[in-house]
Amino acid sequence: MKDYSSLPPVHVVLESTSGRLARERFGHDATVGAVRMILENERRLVGEGNLARSADILGGLVLAQLEKGAVSSLRPVLNLTGVILHTNLGRAQLPEVAIEAAVAAMRHTVALEYNLDDGTRGERDEHLRSLICELTGAEDATIVNNNAAAVLLALNSLACSQNVLLSRGEMVEIGGSFRMPDIIARAGCHLKEVGATNRTHRHDFEAAINEETALILKVHTSNYRIEGFTSALSTAELSMLAHEAGLPLMEDLGSGILTDLSAFGLSGEPSVREVIKAGADLVTFSGDKLLGGPQAGFIVGRADLISRINKNPMKRAMRVDKIRLAALEAVLRLYLNPKELPRLSPTFMFLARTRHKILMMAQALCEPVQTLLGQDYLVKVCELESEVGSGAMPTKGLPSAGLAISAVQKTASVEGLQQRLRLLPVPVIGRLKHDCLFFDLRCVEGAGRVMDALEKLKL
Ligand SMILES: *Cc1c(COP(=O)(O)O)cnc(C)c1O
């Protein structure tokens, strides 16, 4: 017996307690839209033989739906993946000083392109230029939206319609859509592949250089290593060769390392200063990888080349806004006193954490998490390996620790748990491997954060 007459009309749901609350918070039109949707669904249920629910209950559903729609999908999550600079989770967390600088720049007008000394028009990159030069040993610098833009802009400015030489061992793809050959083509340049995948020699480059050549490019193999029977030219060797031929050498470093990382047990990644010193004429790098700042791309190096880049109209399309410039400046200032980085920069704080420290956090969390998840799951402390992420040190793990969660009842699954964790107000993102859900605790400020997020599972 289908009784559609028991369905309350729209205006009655709108007048219910929750309906009124919904209108107050989300406005009349949005609420009416939600009421229509809920009633449509209810009509379908009645059609299937169910009894219509009261206007009050339906009003509650309307309010819940509007509230759900108002929660941003770009919300903070707990990164328990063990990847410090996780591209899909927004890479670096900014230092507090940078957040404050960004907030001040958002709230106020700032002297972005205004010279406070004499009231003339200024230049937005000027605020950071001397700082970057000091930290890298470069002559000049320019800043754009991200490192992909930096590469594109530099190539287009210096080698449009001409040849760019790149070793076949360095045809990098950085996840998704950034592929060196494609970027070179889109910059309007002709790629000349040099050498073989595993071996490229000096004579390969010499044979490839002709009057059409505008630039030699070296790309950091950020996310892979070629091992075995290999040969490649160092920055110093390539720069000598380039300069003998009267060509600039540009090196795309990816991660912008501005300080000695050996104190963190990380070695083998060249710093920007080292690459400049070795003779690269231009170096490009990211703001939100190991540098630990907001998304940005830097081009540093010879002043005459930077000047040509700044004259390219594409620069205007890639420039950064006041908010990011303010944050970047604050991050760069931290490098003037690198000893303090582990205290002030979350990226360095996470890098510096020892397995011992992380293990203690895991031990403190094990029992409360087990109690929370109940008999369906088994929670154990385990040793793990974290990664730097974003194409830094791809083959080197950082000794870490955390929790391993497995399902012990047939009715439970780790995939199901993973889904529930994703739906939390502060979603908890772990790593699924071998039927086990791992929580790597390297990148959380404290055990309390994890418990606060997980508590909501009970509801
Ligand atoms: C990461 C990376 C890029 C891209 O940098 P974004 O800041 O993500 O645009 C380019 N080149 C290399 C070598 C990289 O590692």
Image (cartoon, grey):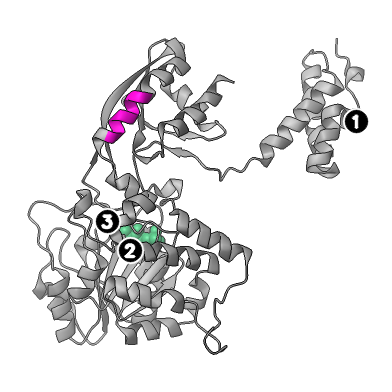
Q: Which residues are magenta?
A: 357-364
Residue 193 is a magenta residue: no
Q: CA distance from mark 3 to mark 2?
A: 23 Å
Task: Name the foreground residue: 295 vs 172.
Answer: 295
What amino acid type should be assigned to the residue bearing mark 1? Glu
Q: CA distance from mark 1 to mark 3?
A: 60 Å
Residue 161 in view in this figure = no
**Label 1 or label 3, whichever comes before in sequence order:** 1
- Observer-side mark, 1 or 2, equals 2
Q: Which SS does the magenta portion mostly show?
A: helix
Which residue carries the number 2 mark? 335
Left or right, residue 11 beside residue 124: right
Look at the numbered disc 1 and give the secondary structure of its residue. helix
Mark 3 residue's CB less than 8 Å from ligand 1:
yes
Residue 58 in view in this figure = yes
What amino acid type should be assigned to the residue bearing mark 3? Ser
Which residue carries the number 3 mark? 222
**Label 1 or label 2, whichever comes before in sequence order:** 1
Contact check, label 1 and label 2, Cβ < 8 Å = no
Which residue carries the number 1 mark? 15
Look at the numbered disc 3 and give the secondary structure of its residue. loop
Binning the other alpha carbons within 10 Å of mark 2 as few (below 14), some (14 to 19) or many (20 upward) gives some
Looking at the picture, how far across and down is residue 69, in whole percent?
A: 68, 39
Is residue 142 shown above or below 414? below
What amino acid type should be assigned to the residue bearing mark 2? Tyr
Looking at the picture, how far across and down is residue 7, in whole percent?
A: 88, 21
Task: Name the foreground residue: 254 vs 303.
Answer: 303
Quadrant of the snapshot with the C terminus: top right
Look at the numbered disc 2 and give the secondary structure of its residue. loop
Q: Residue at x 43, y 12 (%)?
A: 376
